[in-house]
Structures are given as C-alpha cells and as structure tokens.
Amino acid sequence: MLDVFVIGGGINGTSVARDAVGRGYSVALAEMNDLASGTSSAATKLIHGGLRYLEHYEFRLVHEALAEREVLWASAPHIIWPLRFVLPHHKGLRPAMVLRAGLALYDHMGGRRLLPPTKTLDLTRDEAGKPLKPGYKLAFEYSDCWVNDARFVVLNARDAADKGATIHVRTKVVSAKREDGGWTIELDGEAGRQTVRARMLINASGPWVDEVINQTMGKNAAHNVRLVQGSHIVTKKLYDHDRCYFFQNSDGRIFFAIPYEGEFTLIGTTDRDYRGDPKDVAITPEETDYLLKAANEYFAQGVSRDDIVWSYSGVRPLFDDGASAAQEATRDYVLKLEGNAADGAVVNVFGGKLTTSRRLAESVLEKIEEVLGRKGPAWTKGGTLPGGDFGPKSFDAEVRRLGLDYPGLPAPLLSRLMRLYGTKARAVLGAAKSTADLGDHFGTDLYGAEVDYLVANEWARTAQDILWRRTKLGLTVGPEDVARLEGYLADHVALRPSPA
C-alpha cells in the first residue's frame, strides 16, 4: 500500500509529490491529461509577491510569496529569473504616494537579498517612457521574477520521479473509496484499468477539486471553489527593452505587459467569474477587447487584433470566500483535512499559485505527518530542480560553458536549451558536433534529439505537449512542421516506455 496518492498534475500536485517522496513516503500521482495542461500553464508566468494583494490586506500571502521569490530562483535558475517592473503613475487613479508606500512595504516584507530595490523613474528621460504616450512622466521600478510555468510543473514531476514517485499521465482517477483503513483508487489511462491502494489521498485537482469530491469520492453538494477566468494575449513585440510594465486600469484592476519568448509581448490578465466546464475555457471577444483597450490607454503605438499572434485562457480555482467581485476573491490557499489513519485520510487543496506552491506543499506535508507520522525532514527550501544545479546569477556563465562543450552548434539553440533544461541540456545534445547530428528537423531549431528527450524523460506524447508546454516553439513553427512532428511522434511514442 502506498503512503500517499496525489490527484492532479499541476503545480500543487507535483510539488506535493516531490516534497513527500523526498521525505521518505511512497508516492504516486495521476493526471488525467498532460502535466500542466490546466491552470498551471495558463498563468501570467510570474514568481511575485502580488503587489495588488496588499490592497486587500492579504499580508500573510504577500509576505510568504515575497520570501519565496529568491528561494525558487535559486532552485531553478534556468527557468526562473529576475525581471524589473515599471509601474507608471496614472493621474486620476492610485495616488503616487500610495504607490510609493506600497512598494516600500513590498521591498521590506520578504527578506529580499539578491533582487534590487525599488527606484523612481523619470519617464521623460528613461528608455521605459519611449513606448508610452507622452502624458506619463513618473514611474516606479521594482523587482519580481519570471517563471516558465509549464516547465516548473514538469521539473517538479521529474524530480519526484527521480526520487521514487510513480507519475501517471493521461490517467483519470475513476473512483476513490475508503476501504480497510485506506483508499482503493481505480485508474483508467495509458496502462489500462488498474487499482492502487493508498493510506492517504491528496486532492490537488485544481478547477476539478469539487468534482473529485462529489463524483470520484462519492460525496454530494461540495462547493468550495470559485472559478475565475484569466485570459492573455500575445502580440508582436511592442517595445525593445527588457523590462515589464505593471499598468493600472480605470476599473481598479491591473494588468501586465511582459517581453515574451524574444519576439513577442504578453499582455494580461483578465478576471471574470467562469461557470462552464474548465476544459472548455477560451478567451472571449470581450476579454480581447478589454486587454486591447487597456493596452491602448498606455502604449503610443496602437495595438489591434492584427497584432495578436496567440491567446490563451485558464481557470483559477480560488477558494470561495464570498467576495463580491472576482478580483477581490482571495488568492491564498486553503487546505482541509478529513479522516484519519484508521479509516483513510484526504487533504483537499483549494486555491494556490505558482509562487507559493513549494510552501503549500510543506503545509500539506504537515497534514500528512499528522496522519501518517513523520519521516524525513523538510528539504525543498535548499533543493534544486533538475538542471538547476548552478548559482542564481550564473546562467550566462553556464551558457558560455555549454558553448565551449558544443562549439559546432548555433549559439541561439544552446541558449534556448539552457533556458529550458539547464545543465540537462547536455543530456539532450549528447555527442552532437553539428545540427546534422541532432536528427530530424521540425522547424525553427527543434530537432529529433530534443523530441526524443522529452518523450523519454518528460512524459511528452503529442505535438501540443512539446510545442506549447515543454517549449513555446508553437509560436514560430509552421503547419508543415507540426504535421511532420505529429507523424514522427506517431511512429516513435508507442515504441518508448513511459518515463521512470
């Protein structure tokens, strides 16, 4: 019998699985689709304290999130890195003194050591003012971090598997019943129908958490989450510098404009209640209009639908605290433990975010220890994710080192692989001396060697897995490339066993 079975392959589920197996518990996880195929790959992709949460007095959440920025950066410096955010003062919205006070609090709440502090900008002189309309003169520049969200999930799963956890992808938990002092869990997926037993169940299924309680676990009328839709648009590059913008909107909300994948700008997010099936979520015309109108309030160069190259939408499973507006609902997580060691316990996970996922996992482990007893100590604060075994400020040095090892390969390819795989890039490249040694070419700089690595080590099965979650090359490859990749995967995936 397993100690712990986790339902859900998003950031919360994979973080719990990683932490638990690292402490000595036997662990398995099931995700009904691909890893990070839901909320966890539809975020604004930030590791941040949540400056706007200060307005809602969520000081505990902001403090915890701020403290996590440098912890997570150190654990995965290939997929997490610092960014500077420019917050222009908009006359008629929040006063400058309020912004300045909030940022002073932001700078000092979270034990910042490596990230630079806030400073004031004169937008009439600073480069950050050039893309903006002339009326914006004052801004504040502060620090947060960027994360490749889908890879963050996959690397947590990979580390959990490396430590002994079993990861089931494309495997639905059909039922979970309390029997004989534990849980009998029926699975249906890649390996067919199977039954596993576990002493404790962790329901980290995100937008489907109530559905798992109601249907999979056989309870009725659970209503714990408020589904809030957040949508983003990706446009052609709107400016040349490497800083982000944190903009205020006239309805009291905020949105970001962020340099994205080299040649694009990411704009989002929206906040609206969602009442449909989470699997059907998609950006609406109204949300597109909202984001375009908001961007055009600030940028001198007009932004239109013709500039949009991609859009995505996700559903945040926020704990339903009765807030009147979607943007006021708490972003904090709530954990509910039911049952005990004698009859089978479950922890239901509500809410959460990328930034606090490691701390959420530690809190879940406290519940697990309460039921199953303590095994190993907490360890993830000083741990690294696969490929992240170098210093948080050493990324450029690692790229140079990789270039010395592979002088015959293009520098942009090496830099991209280091950003995705860190020191594991060498496992992708093997003994290659030129691109001819990397196998079939699938457009841009995607080759068979990388595809094979993702299939063998990161549970990739489809072209969408590879082009939109393991990488973002879907932004640049053509339809012929996609068709060729799909054909290659059809021939190769069935021949490879699932990653250990």
Image (tube, helix red, strand yellow):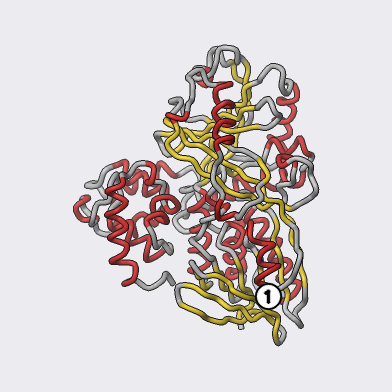
Residue occupying the far left of the picture: 436
Point 31% across, 64% down: residue: 490
Is 41 positioned to the left or the right of 175 in the image? left
Rendered location of residue 143, percent (x, y): 60, 34
Q: Nearer the viewer, residue 278 or 195?
A: 278
Instruction: Name the residue carrying label 1.
Output: 200
Rendered location of residue 245, percent (x, y): 56, 29
Q: Is residue 355 above or below residue 215?
A: above
Point 73% across, 68% down: residue: 367
Q: Is residue 284 above or below residue 5?
A: above
Q: Nearer the viewer, residue 482 or 376?
A: 482
Is 417 positioned to the left or the right of 298 in the image? left
Dot 1 alpha-carbon crowd within 10 angstroms: few under 14, some 14 to 19, many 20 or more: many
Residue occupying the far bottom of the picture: 180
Rendered location of residue 22, percent (x, y): 58, 68
Tally of numbered discs? 1
Helix, strand or loop status at disc 1: strand
Q: Quadrant of the N terminus?
A: bottom right
Residue 341 is drawn in which quadrant?
A: bottom right
Rendered location of residue 479, percent (x, y): 31, 47
Q: Is residue 9 visible?
A: yes
Q: Is residue 71 above or below residue 499?
A: above
Residue 17 is drawn in which quadrant?
A: bottom right
Point 28% across, 57% down: residue: 448
Type of residue at label 1? Met
Residue 145 is drawn in which quadrant?
A: top right
Is 248 positioned to the left or the right of 191 in the image? right
Q: Quadrant of the C terminus?
A: bottom left
Point 64% across, 81% down: residue: 184
Q: Is residue 85 visible?
A: no
